[in-house]
Image (tube, rainbow, N blue to C red):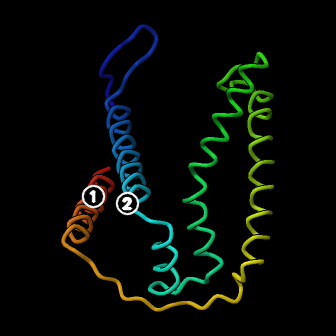
Amino acid sequence: GEPLYYLGPIVVRTGAIYGFIEVSLKLGLLLSATLLFTSLTNPRDLLRSLESELGFPKHISFMVSLSLRLLRVFEKDLAEIQLIRKSRGFRATPITLSDWESLISPLLNLGLERGRWIGIAAELRGFSLRKIKKTCLKLGLNDYFLLFLLLIEIVFSTILQLKS
């Protein structure tokens, strides 16, 4: 694009500004939809609707539901690991590769260990023998409003994509 600003040796062009705005809007839409989904969704209802209405296998719907539940747990684990790193004299926020390794390694170990015990507990409770209940999806006025807003977001992002 054409040069818009000159900041010393840095040239800001119009195409860069439009690209930045487009990517920012896409990320904003994605994050707002994700935040809305995670804040309004009960993992148990999600599990039921994935199995009965969408026909997902129960192992996949269990995995999706469990991942929503474990987000908060992993967030607490990450905060604890950062606190431990800080108390040992490391940076709380990783910068180098070794910093990332010392942060991700314990987080992965905790996640794998937790996953192993969750799998054992699910099998002991008879997860594989569980029957799928068929339920009917009932939408209210708020649901239709949110679907309408989602449709507007999709149309708006499609128009932005077609213009570029």
Q: Who's the residue at 40% across and 55% down the image?
A: 39
Label 1 or label 2, whichever lies nearer to me, is 2
Asked if 93 appears above or below 89 in the picture, the reply is below
- From the top left corner, tell me how far across and down residue 76 is, in percent: 62, 41
Q: Which mark is residue 153?
A: 1
Q: Who's the residue at 75% across and 40% down the image?
A: 104
Instruction: Name the quarter where the N terminus is drawn.
Output: top left
Left or right side of 146 for 38: right
- From the top left corner, tell me how far across and down residue 141 is, in percent: 18, 71
Indicate the secondary structure of the residue bearing disc 1: helix
- Quarter-wise, where is residue 123 in the image? bottom right
Q: Which mark is residue 40?
A: 2
Q: Which residue is most to the front?
A: 125
Closest to the observer, 105 or 80? 80
Q: Which mark is residue 135?
A: none
Asked if 134 appears above or below 127 in the picture, the reply is below
- From the top left corner, tell me how far across and down residue 67 is, in percent: 60, 60
